[in-house]
């Protein structure tokens, strides 16, 4: 009910009450008066103060400010200066006009209509890439007219434009307009997808609409009808065949794109086809740059300075579009039931998705999140709770009745299975959010993956305490449930396995995102090795208890549970092998970087205000809060025996570890996709192993190069190896991520200087 | 410094402080009007306005478009064209461009 309606209702009441002296009329009248007062906007008195304000201001001393106490000069810095051409987006130079001269209703030949459409196609790709609408799509004057605040459904370019029947006006008012409307609507749908999931504003994507609305009065269905009308018009139009086909291809592209956004289940392969259709006829375009203008920014709500319109090359744009379509197709492929039913296959799939090259854009990552977290269930009959239970079973409790789904169905309170299930549930409820986050975090941009992991570490550390308590409770109740005394701390182990995994990922993503300085690499490899040591020990103990459990199952001839155990055994072994391979690589690179330090090829820069402890604390911050099995401190790092190993023995250490890594990788190659749980991502798994093998080779090559240089110059200079300075003869560089054999493994490169 | 000048200056500052956080309508030389809350000013009459909206007279083309639309809709009465309004946030309006200043009481 609008404000006016309320007032009317009450005045009715007041009239009805008149003449009765029971006070109802008086009360109603008073209510009416008050309502009117509240509802009517206050009449604002405006007073001209130009003269007196200026006179008073003149009295102030230069530099004296009259300011609100809560307003800081820090804030003032962000204020935009009006009339400054670089700051004021509304500034119009004297020789210029406010609005562009171009008339959006003017007739255009097909070639120019094609060009405008293709330009919008490029702008749309740029917007997907993270640029604001004000620098991309909104610079189109046709789009600007359609979304202008005084335009209403059916959103015409001009009130009377549908009367036009000539070919070149129909091209604008039917074809181009329909294309623009569909494109604007598509932006609204993309925004909806992005905003309904986790993303980082400005960092990933700009959702700002600059005070405009994206055709609120038009549904995607209306929209499709508009495009269909355009198709119809086009088929009847008297126009050269190749131009008709070209226009048709563009309409087909936009309508397909829109349909896919409306219903994500449609196959995105179709979009790829339409993109190819558009690309084929791009040559027919005739440029019409006047149809786009930065001047639209003068009328957009913004608190930023004017920014240039973006120029995107056609080739870039088509590549980006193909990537989007392929990425969405891949997101679908990576979430088929065969994958989503298995937590570990699914985890691998999310990583594979995140590591597509280039990384999928914000929209596609949001699309992936919608598939995973959009509904209650991740697959037809799997919830995240089920997924987590399977995860616990496969890692630590295979063959144990504790994790039988049946146990969760028992309703007899005296049954120990019922009680254990409730205890398990209570723990799982506490851990569920963080568990789901493991999947969600990987769908963020790379820096954020690492950053959210750093925050997750202490949460998982806290969960360990919870797990310990739950394990104790379970042990109390489950003695009757268990076959023998093979009980250990399953939930603690499970939690710790994840915590250690996330810690290792944090280090490795740190390498990838280049946050460690060259002089920090040595310690980081050492720390990574420590984390993996812990993880391997833990995996061994879990494997040990599994074997015990299998023995008793064997005695009972429980084949179903035994099969479960065997699968878990295979998976645990593959996890251990992966951890061992990582450990060996870290243990090879750690002495290698240590050698670089000793030979003065990596030196610690002079830092006036930093000492080693502060640097350690800054770098290790995510790990310092860990209370269960904390990482070693600085002293322990310095006390490591490697410090005392002479250089000519260090080479041997590197060599041993590279060999070890290679042989472990060889073992891993023999593991089947089912055992390692990379179903659906077999190709990427093979590639991963290949990359690690190449990294091994790179370490070996760099080590022998370094060794050769050290020996050669040692001999020439008559220097002792223990006090050798190679800095004048060689340089070390850390390869950029794109030049690495594996993103997570930067192998410092040694290059001899030319004499 | 004569004490009367000092007195005057503090009175001026006091007077100006009375305008802080009041809504000002500031017209500048190019015809635009800024409506926002005063946060800060100085002896050159530079103003910092917060939560500011910019108002601009509609262009001839905009008036013509509105007139055409009105005609096509076959509605009675006069054509109404609103001032173009947009949000610009925190701005500095340099004193030199100010042609008129009004305050909402």
Image (spheres, coloured by chain):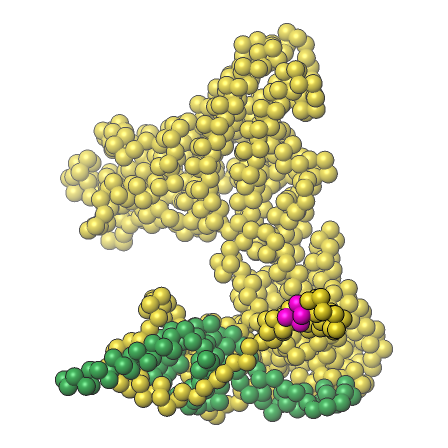
Chain colours: A yellow, B green
Residue displayed at 28% across by 37% down: A594
Query: Could you tell whether A479 is left or right of B10 in the image?
Result: right
Residue A190 vertical position relative to residue A686 in the rendered view, above or below:
below
Q: Position of residue B63 (x, y in %)?
A: 64, 90
In the image, A474 versus A306, the foreground residue is A474
In the image, A343 versus A358, the foreground residue is A343
Residue A439 vertical position relative to residue A233 in the rendered view, above or below:
above
In the image, A571 versus A82, the foreground residue is A82
Query: Could you tell whether B83 is left or right of A450 in the image?
Result: right
Residue A251 visible to the viewer: no
Q: Position of residue A618 (x, y in %)?
A: 31, 44
For this orientation, the residue located farthest to the right is: A236
Q: Position of residue A566 (x, y in %)?
A: 62, 20
Query: Could you tell whether A640 is left or right of A209 in the image?
Result: left
Which image quadrant is residue A437 in? top right
Q: Specify the segment rendered in magenta.
A: A26-30
Query: Could you tell whether A610 is left or right of A319 in the image?
Result: left
Residue displayed at 43% across by 36% down: A458
For this orientation, the residue located farthest to the front is: A21
Residue displayed at 61% across by 71% down: A34
User: Is most of the magenta stretch helix, strand or loop?
Assistant: helix
Residue A194 visible to the viewer: yes
Quadrant of image for the N terminus of chain A: bottom right
Q: Is residue A717 magenta?
A: no
Residue displayed at 63% across by 45% down: A373
Residue A39 vertical position relative to residue A395 in the rendered view, above or below:
below
Residue B45 vertical position relative to residue A618 in the rendered view, above or below:
below
């Amino acid at each position: 009910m609008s404000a006016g309606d309320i007032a009317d209702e009450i005045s009715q009441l007041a009239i009805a009450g008149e003449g009765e002296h029971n006070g109802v009329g008086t009360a109603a009248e008073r209510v009416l008066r008050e309502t009117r007062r509240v509802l009517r906007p206050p009449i604002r008195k405006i007073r001209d103060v130009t003269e007196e304000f200026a006179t008073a201001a003149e009295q102030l001393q230069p530099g004296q400010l009259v300011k609100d106490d809560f307003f800081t000069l820090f804030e003032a810095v962000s204020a935009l200066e009006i009339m400054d051409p670089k700051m004021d987006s509304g500034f119009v130079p004297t020789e210029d006009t406010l609005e562009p001269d171009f008339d959006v209703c003017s007739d255009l030949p097909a070639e120019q209509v094609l060009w405008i459409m293709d330009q919008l196609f490029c702008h749309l790709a740029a917007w997907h890439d993270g640029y604001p609408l004000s620098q991309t799509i909104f610079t189109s004057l046709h789009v600007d007219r359609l979304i202008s605040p005084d335009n209403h459904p059916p959103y015409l370019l001009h009130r009377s434009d549908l009367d036009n029947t000539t070919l070149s006006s129909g091209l604008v008012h039917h074809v181009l307009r329909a294309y623009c409307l569909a494109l604007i609507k598509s932006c609204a749908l993309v925004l909806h997808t992005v905003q309904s999931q986790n993303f980082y504003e400005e960092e990933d994507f700009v959702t700002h609409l600059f005070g405009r609305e994206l055709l609120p009065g038009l549904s995607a269905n209306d929209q499709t009808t508009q495009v269909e009308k355009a198709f119809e018009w086009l088929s009847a139009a008297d126009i050269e065949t190749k131009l008709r086909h070209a226009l048709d291809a563009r309409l087909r592209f936009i309508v397909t794109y829109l349909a896919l956004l409306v219903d994500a289940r449609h196959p995105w392969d179709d979009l790829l086809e339409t993109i190819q259709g558009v690309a084929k006829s791009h040559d027919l375009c005739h440029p019409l740059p006047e149809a786009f203008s930065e001047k639209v920014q003068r009328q957009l709500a913004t608190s930023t300075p004017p920014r240039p319109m973006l120029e995107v090359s056609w080739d870039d744009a088509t590549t980006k579009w193909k990537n989007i379509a392929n990425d969405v197709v891949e997101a679908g492929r990576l979430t088929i039931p065969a994958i989503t039913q298995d937590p570990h296959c699914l985890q691998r799939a999310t990583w594979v998705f995140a590591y597509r090259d280039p990384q999928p854009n914000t929209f596609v990552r949001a699309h992936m999140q919608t598939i995973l977290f959009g509904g209650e269930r991740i697959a037809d009959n799997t919830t995240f709770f089920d997924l987590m239970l399977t995860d616990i079973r496969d890692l630590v409790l295979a063959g144990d009745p504790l994790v039988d789904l049946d146990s969760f169905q028992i309703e007899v309170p005296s049954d120990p299975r019922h009680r254990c299930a409730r205890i398990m549930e209570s723990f799982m409820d506490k851990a569920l959010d963080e568990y789901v986050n493991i999947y969600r975090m990987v769908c963020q941009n790379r820096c954020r993956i690492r950053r959210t992991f750093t925050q997750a570490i202490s949460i998982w550390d806290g969960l360990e305490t919870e797990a310990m308590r739950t394990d104790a409770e379970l042990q109390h109740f489950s003695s009757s449930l268990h076959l023998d005394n093979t009980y250990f701390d399953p939930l603690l182990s499970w939690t710790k396995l994840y915590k250690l995994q996330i810690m290792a990922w944090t280090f490795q993503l740190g390498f990838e995102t280049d946050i460690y300085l060259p002089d920090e690499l040595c310690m980081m490899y050492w720390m990574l090795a420590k984390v993996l040591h812990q993880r391997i020990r833990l995996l061994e103990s879990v494997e040990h208890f599994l074997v015990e459990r299998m023995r008793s199952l064997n005695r009972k001839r429980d084949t179903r549970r035994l099969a479960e155990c065997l699968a878990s055994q295979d998976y645990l072994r593959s996890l251990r092998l992966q951890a061992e391979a990582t450990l060996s690589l870290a243990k090879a690179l750690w002495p290698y970087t240590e050698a670089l330090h000793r030979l003065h090829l990596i030196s610690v820069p002079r830092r006036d205000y930093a000492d080693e402890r502060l640097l350690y604390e800054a770098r290790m911050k995510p790990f310092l809060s860990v209370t269960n099995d904390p990482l070693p401190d600085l002293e322990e790092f310095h006390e490591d025996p490697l410090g005392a190993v002479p250089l000519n023995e260090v080479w041997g250490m590197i060599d041993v570890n590279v060999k070890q890594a290679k042989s472990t990788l060889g073992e891993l190659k023999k593991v089947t996709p089912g055992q390692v749980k990379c179903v659906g991502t077999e190709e990427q798994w093979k590639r991963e192993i290949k990359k690690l093998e190449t990294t091994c080779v790179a370490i070996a090559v760099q080590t022998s190069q370094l060794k050769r240089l050290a020996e050669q110059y040692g001999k020439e200079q008559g220097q002792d190896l223990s006090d050798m300075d190679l800095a004048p003869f060689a340089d070390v560089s850390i390869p950029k991520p794109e030049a690495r054999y594996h993103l997570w493994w930067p192998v410092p490169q040694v290059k001899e200087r030319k004499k | 410094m004569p004490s009367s000048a000092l007195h005057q200056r503090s009175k001026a500052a006091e007077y100006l402080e009375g305008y802080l956080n009041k809504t000002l309508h500031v017209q500048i030389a190019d015809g635009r009007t800024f409506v926002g809350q005063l946060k800060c000013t100085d002896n050159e009459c530079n103003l910092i306005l917060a939560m500011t909206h910019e108002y601009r007279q509609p262009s001839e083309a905009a008036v013509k478009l509105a007139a055409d639309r009105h005609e096509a809709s076959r509605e009675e009465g006069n054509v109404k064209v609103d001032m173009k309004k947009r949000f610009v946030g925190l701005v500095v309006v340099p004193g030199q461009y100010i042609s008129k200043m009004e305050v909402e009481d």
